[in-house]
Image (cartoon, rainbow, N blue to C red):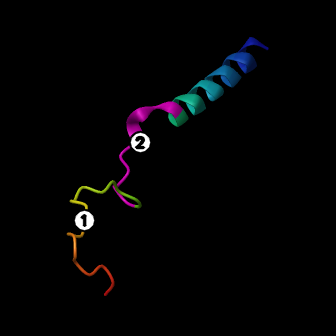
Amino acid sequence: MSFNVAKTINFLLEGSLEIFSPNHDNYPAIGIQPFTGEIWHPKKGEDTKS
C-alpha cells in the first residue's frame, strides 16, 4: 500500500511542478502593447475635423 501512496504523491508533485515552474514562461510579445509614443494635442485654432 505504501508503494501506491508514494507513486500517487510523486505523480501529483511532478504535475504541480510542471504547472507552476517558471521554465516555460517565455511567451512572445503579442496582443495589446503599452503605448510608447507621444500623444497628439491639436494647437489652438487648428482644424481637428478632417
User: Percent x, y for residue 33?
Assistant: 35, 57
Predominant SS along the magenta part:
loop
Rounded to the nearest angstrom, the CA distance separating label 2 from label 1 is 42 Å
Badge 2 is on which residue? Answer: 24
In the rendered view, does 46 fall on the left or right side of 22? left
Q: Nearer the viewer, residue 5 or 40?
A: 40
User: Percent x, y for residue 7?
Assistant: 67, 23
Which amino acid type corresponds to the residue marked 1 in the rendered image?
His
Residue lying at the far top of the rendered structure: 2
Asked where in the image residue 8 lies, by quadrant, the reply is: top right
Q: Residue at x 54, y 36 (%)?
A: 19
Q: Residue at x 33, y 84 (%)?
A: 49
User: From the viewer's perspective, is residue 14 above or below residue 30?
Assistant: above
> How would you rate the neighbour count of disc 1 (Cα within 10 Å): few for under 14, some for 14-19, many for 20 or more?
few
Q: Residue at x 20, y 69 (%)?
A: 43
Range shown magenta: 20-30
Residue lying at the far bottom of the rendered structure: 50
User: From the viewer's perspective, is residue 43 above or below residue 46?
Assistant: above
Q: Residue at x 22, y 77 (%)?
A: 46
Badge 1 is on which residue? Answer: 41
User: Percent x, y for residue 50?
Assistant: 31, 87
Residue lying at the far right of the rendered structure: 1
Query: For residue 1: magenta?
Result: no
